[in-house]
Image (tube, helix red, strand yellow):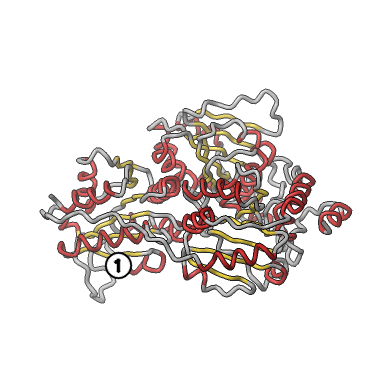
Amino acid sequence: MLVADYLVNVLENYKVTDAFGIPGGVILDFLYALSRHPTITPHLTFHEQTAGFAALGYGQVTGRLGLAYATRGPGILNLITPIVDAYCDSIPALFITAHATPYSTSPLRVQTDQELDIISAVSGFTKYANRIENVNDLPHIIDTACRAATTGRPGPVLLDFYSALWKKDVSFKLPTIPYESQSELSSMLQELEASLSAAKRPVLLIGDGARSMVAQEQLKNLSKIMPIPILSSRFASDLVANNSLYYGYIGSHGCRFANFILSKADLIIAIGNRINISPMSDSFKSIFQSKKIIRFDIDCAELQRQLPNVKSFQGNAKEVLSLLLKNPLKFKGLSSWISICNQIKQELWYKDTEFPVNTIAFLLEHIPQDAILTSDVGNNEFWLARAYIQAKIGNRILYSKSLGALGSSIGKAIGSYYATKKPVYCFTGDQGMQFNIQDLQFIAMNNLPITIVILSNDSSGMILDREVRKGYSPLHVDKSSGYGHPSFRKIADAYQIHYMRITKNLSNVKFPSPLQPNIIEISIDPHIELIPYLPKGYPYQKLYPEISMELYNILNTL
């Protein structure tokens, strides 16, 4: 078989079904090899960045290898933002490119047009990156790359092929799919048992590292035999949304009731949550001073971060939860603690649900239960996260978490659709909408059931808030200071996509069918600030705008 077909056969073994990219001369042989294998469909996006984000959306939803390809030079450089996003958010993804001239250490700035040392460029933010110039190295390098992307803490890998190899005839055997053996975690049971027996107010703190269908099912079963209140990071709220013991997400823009409950806890059991909190923070350092923390993480590098009063164990969420299910730990006195949690949640449930949160929640209440949500970056993601809790739904949400890649949501929506063949609701702001607006053509041309919800506040709202809080006059953040956007109604017409606009008035609103491309624009006053937020130095349960001191004192002394 040809080298190009060998690579595609390996990808088939990894259950890859879709690939995203733009053709280029050095990768045409790979692209035509994909066309000879009907199990993997290549999709032409209209920008390489979208191709990369589509691969990430596919990988996030399926847990399998996402695949993007690009030609040399500018093509692969346009994939760098999605590559870094995959690295920061632990998404399994393979990025394929090629070069026409064997690599050289020549001091010439440009030896061959459009060619560069892409391996050096991405080595700091990939799990594995290598060029393939010798056909005999090919099986080992491809196997190493795919294993690296999909095992341990997942992440992106990049392979840069010497294009002359694509049509070489080879007879290599296909590699076996790796199986991860379980870590030894039995030593943690004794620690957990002792800690739970001493605790009066324990909580489970779930992070995105606990994500998998198995782990979700395990969490449900664990709650039946270990009824401990559950909190989460904002990005993991969909993991436990339907759990009766879930009390929201924490953080500087978290749910008030979640932050309050965290302040009351005396034991935190963190699973798949890296506890990305500075122990030097005036607001959050009391967590480490007043509570015991037991954390589990698959990445031993994360456990090297020194946090006071924290006991750490290495292991993935599936293993930890499986072990707890087999060895349920007994403890007493949780009913009063759960009653306190319920009281706090009830008192604060409707705080911070003004427009636009209530409007977004209304929309979420009318979407299909199996629809995927994708979020962009900015005020829109925080409004969506709070509305998600308010709407009491359990749909999967994809974020760009640690990197915060503006403009990522359209690409992830495309990848999510091909991963699930279910409707997708893509949330973005009027600024993020313009980053990859060209892929509306892809959505319209393929009649994808993607509804793009634009939270349009005619500004770069998050940066506007920060400029105001720093005492600056607006700069490049609104219409008066250099920022603007086109008419999204006219954009929708240009791409022949159904458009509707909604405001605060929700009477007689009828949402369009989710089975077609749609653009829904929610008009928001640019002066509506992002709330709640934690002012610097405030106790982490005292978010702004502040509740009445009477209620605060009542809840704070429970």
Q: Position of residue 257 (x, y in %)?
A: 73, 51
**Residue 292 picture quarter:** bottom right
Q: Secondary structure at mark 1?
A: loop
The image quadrant where one finds the C terminus is: bottom right
**Residue 97 picture quarter:** bottom left
**Residue 139 picture quarter:** bottom left
Q: Position of residue 110 (x, y in %)?
A: 27, 68
- Residue at figure coordinates x 51%, y 68% from the top left: 187
Q: Which is more toward the observer, 546 or 6?
A: 6
Q: Which residue is mark 1?
A: 117
Q: Considering only vertical position in the picture, is 307 above or below 408?
A: below
Q: Is residue 55 visible from the viewing direction of this image? A: yes
Q: Which is more toward the observer, 501 or 239?
A: 239
* Relative side of 286 to 438, left or right: right
Counting labels gives: 1
Q: Position of residue 27 (x, y in %)?
A: 23, 51
Amino acid of disc 1: Asp
* Relative side of 149 to 136, left or right: right
Q: Considering only vertical position in the picture, is 190 above or below 418?
A: below
Q: Position of residue 211 (x, y in %)?
A: 50, 51
**Residue lying at the far right of the rendered structure:** 550
Q: Considering only vertical position in the picture, is 33 above or below 266?
A: above
Q: Is residue 404 visible from the viewing direction of this image? A: no
- Residue at figure coordinates x 78%, y 53% from the top left: 545
Disc 1 crowd, CA 10 A, few/some/many (<14, 14-19, 20+): some
**Residue lying at the far bottom of the rendered structure:** 107
